[in-house]
Amino acid sequence: MNFYKILEEAIESDCIATKEKLTEQCLLYCSQNEVINELEIKPKNFTSPSYINKCQIVEPKALKTRKDFHTKEGLATLVHAIAHIEYSAIDLALDAVYRYPHMCQSYKVDWLEVAQDEIRHYLMLEELLAELGFVYGDFSVHSGLFDALVETAENHLDRMAVVPRYYEASGLDVTPQILKKLDNKKKLPFVAKFIKILNIIYVEEIEHVQKGDHWFKVLCKEENKDINIYFEILKKYKIMDKNRPHLNKKARIEAGFTISEIELLGKS
C-alpha cells in the first residue's frame, strides 16, 4: 500500500466519499501495520484548498452575516459555515499525517481518527443543508484554515500550536455561544437537529484538542522547549491578540490547557 500517495489523493480530492473511503483505508492499514517512517518522503506543498472548485473563496469581511436563524436560508448560512470548518478540518487532520512522516504509529492513528470524525461531522451537516434546500458551495467561504495549513507546513510544533491548540480550541469557546443563540428557536425541527449535531461535534472536538495538546507537549519535550512557547507561536502568526471574549475554561482544562494559559489568553 502506498500510504502517503493515498493520503495525498485524499487531501486533494473534493469528493467527500473519496476522502471517506481513502481515510478508512489508511486508518485500517495504519492500525494493523507499523507504517515505515519514510524520511525520504517529500510531501507536496499544496497551493490551493481541495474545495476550490466547489466554493467561492472571499476575504472573511466579505462573508454574509449569519442571522435570522428562523428562516431556512438564514439557518443554512450558519450550517454551511460550520460545514466548511469541518470540511477544512478533514484536510488538516490528513495533512498532519501526510506532512510529518517521521512521526510514530500512534500519532498517525490519532490524526486519522480525527479525520474520520471530521468527515462524519461534515456529512451530518451536509445532510441538514440538503434538508434546508442547499448544498456545500452555495455560500461563500474563507480559506483561513487552509492558510494555516500552508503557513505551518515547515514547522510541526507550530502546526500543533496553531491548528488544534488555537483554532480548534477556539471552537470550544464559540460553540456554546452558538447553542445559546439557537436555544429560543429549538422547537423548530431544523434548529433542533442542528443543535443535536453541534452537541455531538462539541464533545468530540474536546477530544481532538486533547490529541493536539498531547502531541504539542511531546514535540516540546523532543525539542527541549517550554510549553509557554505556545504564546510566542501565536504572536508569530499574529493571532495572540485576537479578541477572545468567552473563553470556555471548563472545556479547555479538559482538553489539556492549564489555568495559567487560559488566564494569559483571556488577557490578550
Image (cartoon, rainbow, N blue to C red):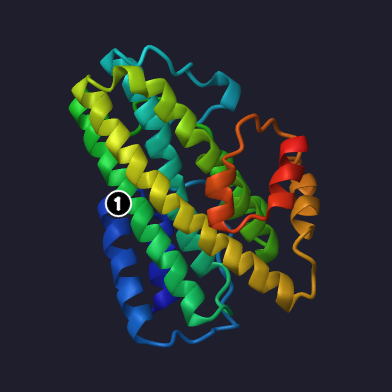
Circle count:
1
In the depicted structure, whether residue 228 falls above or below residue 121: below
Asked whether the viewer can see residue 87, the reply is: no
Name which residue lies at 25% across and 54% down.
17
Residue 8: which quarter of the image?
bottom left
| Residue type pointed to by label 1 | Arg
Foreground pick, 167 / 91: 167
Residue 72: which quarter of the image?
top left
Asked whether the viewer can see residue 216, the reply is: yes
Foreground pick, 89 / 147: 89
- What SS does tag 1 mark? helix
User: Dot 1: within a 10 Å radius of its alpha carbon, few (fewer than 14), some, or many (20 or more) residues?
Assistant: some
In the depicted structure, whether residue 188 falls above or below residue 200: above
Foreground pick, 251 / 84: 251
Name which residue lies at 35% across and 48% down.
14
In the depicted structure, whether residue 2 falls above or below residue 118: below
Name which residue lies at 52% across and 34% down.
174
Residue 122: image x %, image y %? 33, 44
Which residue is label 1 attached to? 120
Does residue 71 appear to the left or right of 64 in the view shown?
A: left
Residue 229: image x %, image y %? 79, 59
In the depicted structure, whether residue 60 falls above or below residue 230: above
Where's the N terminus, which quadrant?
bottom left
Residue 178: image x %, image y %? 44, 28
Does residue 172 appear to the left or right of 194 in the view shown?
A: right
Does residue 24 appear to the left or right of 202 in the view shown?
A: left
Where's the C terminus, which quadrant?
top right
Residue 10: image x %, image y %? 38, 60
